[in-house]
Amino acid sequence: MRIVLVGPPGAGKGTQAGRIVDRFGGVHIATGEILRSNAERGTELGRTASRYMDRGDLVPDEVMIDMVLERMGEGDCAGGFVLDGFPRTVPQAEALERRLEELGCPLDAVVSFEIDEDELRDRLAGRAEEQDRAEDDDEGAIRRRLKLFGDETKPLLDFYDDRGLLVRIEAKGDLDEVTGRIAAALAERGGRAGAA
Ligand code: ADP
């Protein structure tokens, strides 16, 4: 299946993406991880991205679109994918839509992770301790990421709802329960699309 995950930082997209790939196959493309790995290796992309990520800003659309379309051009995406962290803006979604149209392989579903802000702040604080993610440890950067989610990423929900692709999932609660909700919704859609 070809799936996009949309949700605020801390909503659990990364964890659930791994589980979706285990059940439904395909590759997990996590843009935040690709950027962090580039930053660690000191590549040009990594250096550019760090300037934005450290402040909690979005990396510019052109940079992200080039990076993801290149990644999707590697053959393994033909067997399906779970996009985690992209698109995050309407121009990114439009670029993805154009490319998938050219390839003749449209998205099967867009899963929206629905969760309230208080829960997110607690989770991000916990994650900063567990993993070494500086941008989760900075109040200002967290506030900025949550605001950007509302301003830039939320409009994607209407974009995908208009296309009949949007599935809303309650992202609060036990990890297994959330996985169960997503799997049930995807199985239903996969069944309808004949491409589980
Ligand atoms: P989270 O979802 O918790 O914010 P990610 O690991 O997905 O974490 O992303 C970390 C950072 O990488 C973002 O805050 C942003 O700076 C950058 N980033 C990742 N994906 C994108 C994207 N599609 N567009 C712009 N910036 C992005």
Image: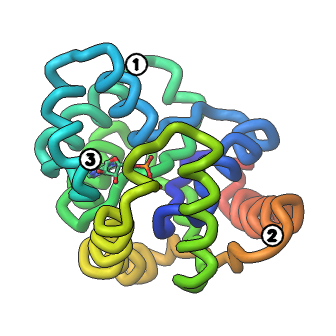
Mark 3 residue type: Asp
Could you tell whether 187 is left or right of 52 in the image? Answer: right
Along the line of sight, which residue is nearer the eye, 150 or 160? 150
Mark 3 surroundings: few (<14), some (14-19) or many (≥20) residues within 10 A: some
Mark 1 residue type: Glu
Q: Mark 3 sits on what residue?
A: 54
Of callouts 2 and 3, the N-terminal one: 3
Q: Mark 2 sits on what residue?
A: 181
Q: What residue lies at 45% left-to-right and 55% top-to-bottom?
A: 136
Above or below residue 79? Residue 74 is above
Which of the two marks, 3 or 1, is nearer to us in this view?
3
Give the secondary structure at mark 2: helix
Residue 159 in view here: no
Along the line of sight, which residue is nearer the eye, 156 or 193? 156
Give the secondary structure at mark 3: loop
Res. 139 image quadrant: bottom left
Give the secondary structure at mark 1: loop
Residue 44 in view here: yes
